[in-house]
Amino acid sequence: MSLVRRDTAGQLHVEEASLAEIARQFGTPCYVYSRAALTAAYDGYRAALAGRDALICYAVKANSNLAILNVFARLGAGFDIVSGGELARVIKAGGDPAKVVFSGVGKSRHEMRAALEAGILCFNVESASELETLNEIAGSLGKRAPVSLRVNPNVDPKTHPYISTGLKTAKFGIPFAEALPLYRRARELPHLAVHGIDCHIGSQLLDPAPAAEAAAKILGLVDALAAEGIALSHIDVGGGMGIRYRDEAAPAATDYLAPLLKVLTGRTERLLFEPGRSLVGNAGLLLTRVEVLKHGEEKNFAVVDAAMNDLARPALYDAWHDMVKVGAGSTANGQKRYEIVGPICESGDFLGHDRDLDLAEGDLLAILSAGAYGMAMSSNYNTRPRAAEVLVDGATAHLVRRREEVAQLFALEAVLP
Ligand code: LLP
């Protein structure tokens, strides 16, 4: 299902809302999301997991806007968080802390305390040191911390090196060989309750085989633990399912999960999933306006009002995002090959290379597949206020984050007396 469609006049819409109208009302750059697309993506997982005891914990880092979290909370989702800040967002958005798993290699004492007080479902522990600290903090609060060990299965997820996490060279997880001794240690610690095991091998995975391979490795451990009397109640297989950005053969949730679920056939443990990108990525776009057309000696440039501070993925990972014109019809300029760039003072500030488009200054462009790791990774570089965010529900476009104002950007700063 495509997020956008053209009406009979050729104007681009998200659900029943016109993008030109959204730009007029809320300005650009502006992130636009679709409630129907979020729900459809979540339902894809639900259908794939029908009949299983499973919890879908949306990975908040992909897009942490309160309205998005609230849509998932209303659908019954749990959440995968990586900071105290994300926990506060989940609670503010109406999420249930009892469905929250807490991942991350460097949880602070303060964050552990907040999560214990909130009563989260499980801490995904990533080191021996974290295990000891958590035990100590839980003891000081008179609580037992529910834990799972994030095990590094040493499986190659075959994705971009920056988003591969499950190889033994990565900083993530507990080395496979050290997992058993660490579970034994966890069992001895009085303020911990051993509940589960988890792994997450990487992101934007298009081939389901590595995730199934990781699950099989993990199961070996689960059985070895059971033989020692350490019975786990859940298995968390992380997130990572990829989406289509350009022409990738991105799997549907049922197809991606099938090999994994096959490996898990007959298991009685509850299954946890931590999808981020696949729930929000293709449910959002970045709406931007062409400010300037420039014709260099070798290249044509379309300078738009969005930049790498709004969408870092092209600059950071050389990621491709499709772009489509919002309006209909052709211009006097005709189709040309453009570099789509932002106004930031760096050559790395591009949103797309070599795009064949028929553009005029003032045109609106929709940069697709921007719902995941878009706004969430934005910054204020060049003192650029961050974009507005709009969530479309049917024909109504709800403003779910106001555009920042310049004065807010330096409100926390001070000059010398
Ligand atoms: N669980 C853990 C422990 C994770 O580290 C991640 C993502 C997820 C779940 C969700 O993975 P997903 O289903 O979204 O693939 N900024 C990068 C992606 C970084 C992913 C980091 N970890 C990008 O824009 O491609």
Image (cartoon, grey):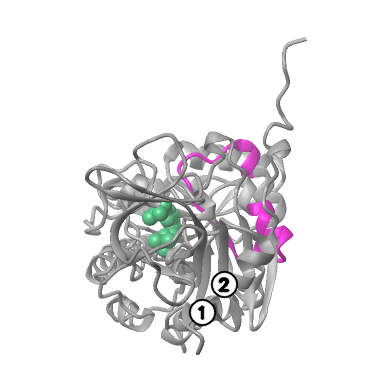
Quarter of the rendered image showing ligand 1: bottom left
Inter-mark Cα distance, 2 to 1: 8 Å
- Do the numbered discs 2 and 1 sit on residues whose CB atoms are within 8 Å? yes
Asked if residue 272 lies in the magenta stretch, the reply is: no
Number of numbered markers = 2
Element type at mark 2: helix
Earlier residue among tags 2 and 1: 1
Cβ of mark 1 under 8 A from ligand 1: no
Q: Position of residue 343 (x, y in %)?
A: 47, 42
Asked if residue 102 lies in the magenta stretch, the reply is: yes
Q: Is residue 229 left or right of residue 69?
A: left
Which numbered dot is residue 19? 2
Camera-nearest residue between 54 and 164: 164
Picture residue at 64% right of the left edge, 83% below the top: 394
Q: Which residues are magenta?
A: 87-112
Q: Position of residue 106 (x, y in %)?
A: 49, 39
**In the rendered image, which residue does mark 1 sit on?**
11
Type of amino acid under label 2: Leu
Q: Position of residue 143 (x, y in %)?
A: 68, 50
Q: Is residue 257 left or right of residue 31?
A: left
Asked whether the viewer can see residue 68, the reply is: no
Picture residue at 30% right of the left edge, 74% below the top: 250
Q: Position of residue 46 (x, y in %)?
A: 49, 83
Cβ of mark 2 under 8 A from ligand 1: no
Q: Is residue 34 left or right of residue 161?
A: right
Mark closer to the observer (2, 1): 1
Residue 208, by quadrant, is: bottom left
Camera-nearest residue between 385 and 336: 336
